[in-house]
Image (cartoon, coloured by chain):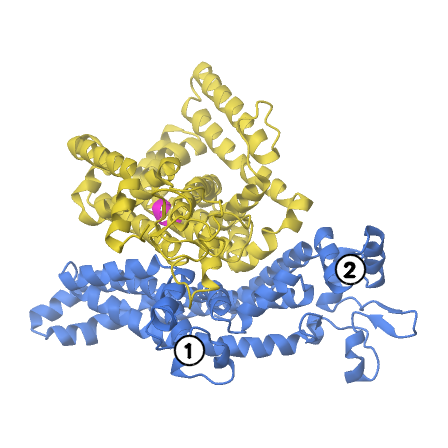
Amino acid sequence: MFLFLTKRIGLMALTSLCLTFVVFFLTNLQPNLEKLAKTQANNRMTDDQVVSWLARNGYDRNLFFRYGEWLGVVPGWQSTADDGKVIGKCAYLKRDFGHVPNYCGLLQGKLGYTSLFQGKVEEIIGKRLLLTGKLMFWVMLVMVPSALLVGVIAGMREGTRTDRSLSTLSIITTATPEYVSGVVFIVIFSSSAVGLKWLNGSATTAMDGITFNNFTLPVMTMALYGMGYIARMTRASMAEVMTAQYIRTARLKGVTFKNIVLKHALRNALIAPFTVIMLQFPWLLTGVVIVETLFNYKGFGWTLVQAAGNNDIELLLSCSIAAVLVVLITQLISDIGYVYLNPKIRVN
Amino acid sequence: MAPLSWFEIFGQMFVQLMPVWIALVMIFLLSVLFKRKLGLYGRLFDSPIGMIGLFIVLFWVLTAIFADMIITHDPLAQVSGMKNKLPGTPVRGQENAFYLLGGDNLARDIFSRMVMGARFVLSIAPAATLFAFMVGITLGLPAGYFGKRLDTILSFLANLVLAFPVILLFYLLVTPEIRVTGIPMILAAFLFLFPIVFLMMLFHSRYYTEPAKRNLYCGITLIFCLWAYSGLAFNSDPLGVFYMDPNLLNVFVSVVFVNSPTVFRIVRGITMDIQTRDYVAAAQTRGEGAWYIMLWEILPNARGPLIVDFCLRIGYTTILLGTLGFFGLGVSPESPDWGSTINDGRKLLSIYPHPALPPAFALMSLVLGLNLLADGLREESLKD
């Protein structure tokens, strides 16, 4: 088990290294840097001015070197501007340390400075992730139990009318992406022209305090899309378990149907959906971006869109680190949990 | 003129869609008549779910084909005075012309835009899925068949792409800036190679013992493929037949790139499973080549799950294209595709809900149709 974990974590580190380099490379392409220069300094700069701006701000050096700086294995660049102020990658840390530190990268726990939100990236990301975490928590709380319930009820009596209608329902929810269901929900529940006007069509106020009014629609929108898939997996798994020999034995012994489902079938039927639920997280990440944009909830997804739209390199890199880590950690948990839940599989 | 009632609106839309209905009835009649001779497709008509799915999918395919006959107005034309008008409003200054589903924020006809959106989606999604399958199959078969180091490397690369949040990848890959650097073209040049390799290996391994036939087939394929390749990837087709707008190429390539690792994983898994069967061992004993076994023994036997996944994946690609449109990536602001129209409509959603709803329902119904079709196919293919 220990060897397995070390191997997996090593692989995870390698994967995130590759991925962040790809993001670094793509955000540092020449046209992107030019766009950055124009948004940060002056939109009407000439090409020469752009080049000199990039040189002045340290963007003209070797790509690998700068990636090393970001990682914290290469000392950050420094120079003195015309007015005597020290500028450089780590200059923003001067107030904290009293001097400009040599290294300020990922290894030192510093993710850089975002010019878009005027602050340290790690603080911004932390704040946004917390907001998204709340959203995710409620989504999971709604999605997982209802999906499992639907799946188990549909799967315990395969082929009945209940099964057929519940399965069709789950197909419908998987066919409705967030930007469709979100729009439909807003029209039905909050539109001032035709709707019921029950709930808030925007979740901006939810950042200060979550209420039923402002949080139901985003949570419902996100939970619905993921629900169908988990429900279908649970149904398939449940249906398979219900045909197993030991269920037949239990039935022949005269165990009531309720007890068969709850005591005999349920635990084995929930092994497969567990993996599915865990692997659902990366998928939810895309959902988060859509839902947060749609409902104007300024969490992680919203930040990612802003960072990408403005080519804020350090913010975008940290967003991708966070996203990639979420994906990889959930994969790891799903693997470990699968081994733990299923005694037939052993890791050596 | 008085605005149309809802009953009249649906009546008019029904009339406008007449070519679609005629073609649908003909296809269904012919299919039911020759059901027994059509294999898996024919058996689809035994399953109600599959039939409903096929009906919805065919409806949108035919709508896309006959789009020019169906639309009532130019989808890009702005008519003054029609801004945000409700469904069924008569067009000012024109006899007997109505905005059947109302006007959008820029006074364009929503019905015509929705119909044209179908053409946009259905010209990209199936083709992109097909390309993703070519890439996934060409890499997944050897990875599953040979295993060992090849498998380790390819799986690592596939997992790398899969670990990327899709939306982040789109934001990085589908921008006007990236088109300047030529990265989409390089990616296209790389990804479009796989269909060529796939077809060449397909014919080469089949007619290996008959060099004359092999050279003929391979030659024809190679000439045709390279012709298409030069046009699609590098936009330098000497005859000008194959051409792809740089915007479109960017979207297309990104969608293929995102989809192929998943296909790779599926194909790899199935290959590892089928590889242990007796007929593979028999072929190995006969001394068949590795590519023959992969392409002519394993692949045909893996077709069931692959066809089902193909349908599902077209639906997923449709959703992805909608996401791209929703964030305004890679499509022109004028474009009538469903994702952009939903995004345009959502800004005034609480006052004018009608511009956003038709494309939303259109997208949902197409994906639903594909999912139902996949379900029907799965059910029927399991009956073997």
Q: Which residue is mark 1?
A: A215
> Which residue is at the front of the view, B288 or A287?
A287
Residue that extends furthest to the top in the rendered view of this protein: B212
Q: Quadrant of residue A21?
A: bottom right
Tell me the CA gap for discs 2 and 1: 45 Å
Residue range corresponding to the magenta coloring:
B309-313
Mark 2 chain: A
Q: Which percent across, then down, holds residue A28?
A: 71, 56
Q: Quadrant of residue A304?
A: bottom right
Q: Quadrant of residue A254?
A: bottom left
Q: Is residue A241 above or below residue B266?
A: below
> What residue is drawn where x is 82% and y is 74%?
A102
Q: Secondary structure at mark 2?
A: helix
Q: Residues within 10 Å of mark 1 (few under 14, many from 20)?
A: many
> Which residue is at the front of the view, B366 or A149?
B366
Which of discs 2 and 1 lies nearer the camera? The answer is 1
Tell me, what hue is chain B?
A: yellow
Q: Are marks 2 and 1 on the same chain?
A: yes
User: Cβ–Cβ below 8 Å for labels 2 and 1?
Assistant: no
Mark 1 chain: A
Q: Secondary structure at mark 1?
A: helix
Q: Is residue A38 left or right of residue B271?
A: right
Q: Which residue is mark 2?
A: A65
Which kind of residue does numbered mark 1 sit on? Answer: Phe
